[in-house]
Amino acid sequence: MSDKVKEYSNGEITVVWKAELCQHSKKCFTGLSSVFDPKARPWINISGADSETIAAQVDQCPSGALSWYKNKT
């Protein structure tokens, strides 16, 4: 198991990825391939969609490997 945690921010929100929790359900990239691309590095392109769309897709993650929070302004 990995304890890798990565954060990706667009200034408005930050997406958190906890690799150890990922069950590879593919919901993230099948639902929003403009942001989530497992073949790319980094695999999350936080500028690939607006914050609301990204947050809605992250909320679909069944394992909790992906989460997000609103940045303080």
Image (cartoon, rainbow, N blue to C red):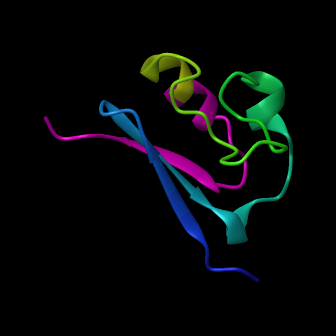
Q: Residue at x 36, y 35 (%)?
A: 13
Q: Residue furthest front?
A: 41
Q: Looking at the image, which is closer to me, 38 or 72?
A: 38
Res 39 quadrant in image? top right
Q: Looking at the image, which is closer to me, 8 or 24?
A: 8
- Position of 60 with respect to 7 (left or right) is right
- Position of 55 with respect to 40 (left or right) is left
Quadrant of image for the N terminus = bottom right
Residue 53: percent from left, percent from top? 54, 18
Above or below: residue 50 compared with residue 55: above
Residue 66: percent from left, percent from top? 60, 49
Q: Residue furthest left?
A: 73
Res 28 quadrant in image? top right
Q: How many marks?
A: 0
Q: Looking at the image, which is closer to me, 24 or 6?
A: 6
Task: Indicate yes or no whether the magenta region holds residue 10.
Answer: no
Residue 56: percent from left, percent from top? 55, 25
Magenta-highlighted residues: 55-73
Q: Residue at x 76, y 25 (%)?
A: 33
Above or below: residue 16 compared with residue 5: above
